[in-house]
Amino acid sequence: MREITFRDFRELMERRNHDVDGLVDLFRGKIEDPREFFERVMSCRWHHEDRSDVVIPYKSLIEFYEQKLHYFKDAAKRQRLCECACGKPVFGQYKFTSDACRKRVQRRKAIVPVKDGGHGLAIITPQVVDFIKEESGHF
């Protein structure tokens, strides 16, 4: 059986959108004092000390981790990814992993109106901005 650290567990649970409350509900009765334990695991801290390299001692938690990891690897092959190109998987009806991803795409698609030497407005797309940056070094 593989050793799973607090950091490994936290990163996978964040990618799968699990929080402390959900994990407490899942493991109530399987481990002692699950709220305290999962708060330590998800923060990787205990009494202001870094505990990210501490190994998880509970067999049920290790099995849960491996199950989620296995699902995550299988799902990644056919999983839709976030439209902002961050590489994170998207579940359900969503297009973006977070609000930050949605905003990132919105900013990329932004159309900036600029005066065009008296001939009306020129529409500058992000591709044009990139071209201008390459040619002149600034925008």
Image (tube, grey):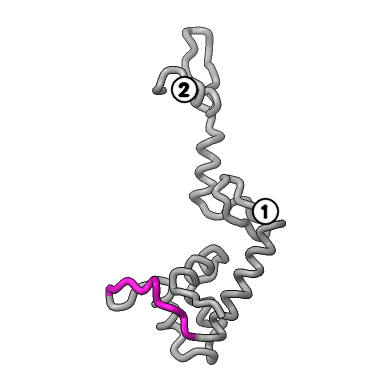
Q: Quadrant of the C terminus?
A: top left
Q: Residues within 10 Å of mark 1 (few under 14, many from 20)?
A: some
Report helix, strand or loop for mark 2. Answer: helix
Q: Quadrant of the N terminus?
A: bottom right
Residue shown at 54%/70% (left/top)? 18
Q: Residues within 10 Å of mark 2 (few under 14, many from 20)?
A: few
Residue shown at 39%/72% (left/top)? 53
Residue furthest to the front: 1
Q: CA distance from mark 2 to mark 1?
A: 32 Å
Residue shown at 32%/71% (left/top)? 50
Magenta stretch: dominant secondary structure: loop
Q: Is residue 39 visible?
A: no
Q: Nearer the viewer, residue 64 or 29?
A: 64
Q: Which residue is mark 1?
A: 80
Magenta region: 48-57
Query: Which one is earlier in the sequence, the residue at label 2 or at label 1?
Result: 1
Q: Per the image, is 35 magenta?
A: no
Q: Which residue is mark 2?
A: 134
Q: Nearer the viewer, residue 110 or 41?
A: 41
